[in-house]
Image (tube, coloured by chain):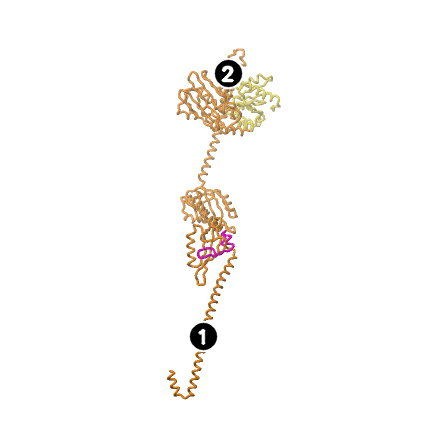
Amino acid sequence: MNILFIEDDLIETMKFKRTIGKLQTQHKITEAKNGEEALQVLGSDDQLPDIILLDLNMPRMSGIEFLKILKADERFKYLPTIMLTTSENRADLLECYRIGIAGYILKPLKYEDYEEKLTKVIQYWEVSELVKA
Amino acid sequence: MEQKFNSTLFKMDSKEVILLKKALERQKLARIQAEKILESKSKELYDTARHLKSANSKLEGLLNKEHSSLGDSFMDIVDPYVIMDMDYNVITMNNSAIDFLGYDHRKERLNVGKLVHKDYIPYTLQAFQSLKDVGTLKNYRAKIVVKGNRHKYIQINCSLIYDTEGKPIGSHGIMRDISQETEIKHLLSEQKKQLHVIFDNSPLGIALAVDGKITKANPSFVNLLGYTENELRKFSIEDVSTCYAKEECDELMRQLDQGEDTVSVTKEYIKKNGDTFLAKTNISAVRDENGQIESQVIVIEDITKEKELEHQKEELLSELESSNKNLQEYAHIVSHDLKSPLRSISALASWIIEDYHDKLDEAGQQQLSLMQEKVAAMDKLIQGILEYSTANSSQLKSSEVDLNEIVETIKETIFIPDHVSVKVPEVLPCIQADRTKMQQLFQNIIGNAVAHIEREVGLVEVLFKDKKEHHHFIIKDNGVGIPEEYHKKIFQIFQSIGNKERSTGIGLSIVKKIVDRYEGEVWVESEMGLGTEFHFTLKKSVLTGQAKTQI
């Protein structure tokens, strides 16, 4: 799968890559440090990602702001977008689902738990039919 | 004379004598006749006189008879009727009077004067006197006490009875029971009095209007508007007020015209000095038999202050709402920013164990797992603080909380210097409460206690007393003590009296807020150098009440 991973925190990115690295199947990960960078990536690349993993709390452009832009775009709006966050904020959760997301994952404290959760997410999208531009 | 007559007789011839003798004879006879007539006439006169006398007495009897027959006809009337002698002893009375008074004159002596209620005695004496003087008494009204000590109001019309010589020999009168009438009158006058008291002293402004014009206004109404009652009489209610909500007001006035008895509107009134105020206005229609409005009663209540307060309340509420919202957002951001690094630390620690497994000895691995535990405890605390800061808008959760377990958890979570021990001498209860709040509550106080012990052997004890309405907890230490001037201050936010770096000044203010939510109290007893006792109570009914709402 082609995964666009949008995260400003270095260690979070390490966590994700470490998790993906342990999986049987190979995945291509494109990293973006913030929303603006992600939009650049999306705009420049001919091939769109299969799924987007997006951190909710980012500097400059928040995850929700990015999500809104994404969902307003004729091409990007079909991309399944999964939110990653540490914040158990119900208002955020409702807003995200309202705009349109494919998942809302709370980052657990322990890395082992994180690995388990993220593995399941990836495995789910592996068996799911993708948009494929 | 006879001699002379005889001598003349002698001179007269015998014929003459005979004539004379015959005449004399006739005269004698006539005299006897006259005497006889006189005698019979005087007898006749005497008889007539006697006859007259008897006739007279017959007449008197007739008169008396007429009186008594007059009495008989009175005896049959519906109203109580009484005949009395001059001392007001009852000679006779009708059945109606017997029933009414409850006494029977045939069985016992009855004096009407004695029935009169003591309050009416002077008036009655006056009335009796006037009866004697004038012969009649009209509209005598008094209270009497009839058999069975029952009080009755009566009205009497009576007159004297005279004998043949015009001497008064008694009186007779008709009574009327006016108790009900009098009571109603009393009641009416009482009510009138009460109404006046209400009218004059009501804090509400009350005015009467006839044909729209104000005819009467009470002191409150006068005070509210600043006009005198006389000045107000020139106005109609519409002259001194405008409708607050015009359409609604017009509609209500229409309803009043169409037969509604009372309408309630909010109106703005204009005072004499030009100031205005809002008043709740009740207008009630007083109607005649045909349903036409005779007058209106207008009751006004100044609600300017209430409106202001209402407005202030709304403003405060919306401010509070937005500040609550801000606080919540702020808390979420802060908690995210605190939690993210914790996740990184946790991940890095587990990677060290995973990646450098063979290079770490057992002690190293243990230290890393201890680090993981502390990270976990901190994560929990951050979560707790987040929940607390949003507590005003969120319900307290409720579950069975074992406080012994809570204290044990705290002992693992907080930093306890080696020389200090935390002990629970007697088993603490299990209570229905919010687990996070209980953890925060005990942790903050115990944490505060262990941090301020400077002596060689420090001891912190958690004690419990079961009070009637409260759970009472005491956290007792043998630390440095808290000066009395700080006993209140320490519960205010950011008021830290220690110079320790880890003291944030938040902990005890959280304690206070939690205790407040459980309608308890928190206070400090301390002696410098000897130690401190933190006391706090939690109200049982609130704890169980919370538990009920959870179900």
Measured from the top left, where is residue B220 in percent x and y?
42, 44
| Highlighted magenta segment, given as a residue range | B83-105
* Display colour for chain B: orange
Earlier residue among tags 1 and 2: 1
What amino acid does circle 2 point to?
Answer: Leu
Residue to which mark 2 is pinned: B370
Residue at 39%, 23% (x, y): give it: B483
- Relative to B18, is A12 on the left or the right? right
In the rendered image, residue B319 lying in the magenta stretch gets the answer: no
| Residue that badge 1 annotates | B39
Question: Nearest the camera: B330 or B143?
Answer: B143
Chain of the residue under label 2: B
Residue B71 vs residue B387, the one in the foreground: B71
Residue B522 seen: yes
Residue nearest the viewer, comparing B10 with B116: B10
Please, which chain is the residue tagged with disc 1 on?
A: B
Q: For residue A30, what is the image quadrant?
A: top right
Mark 1, Cα crowd under 10 Å, few <14 / some 14-19 / many 20+, is few
Question: Which chain did the renderer colour yellow?
Answer: A
Crowding near the residue tagged with mark 2, few <14, some 14–19, many ≥20 C-alpha atoms within 10 Å: few
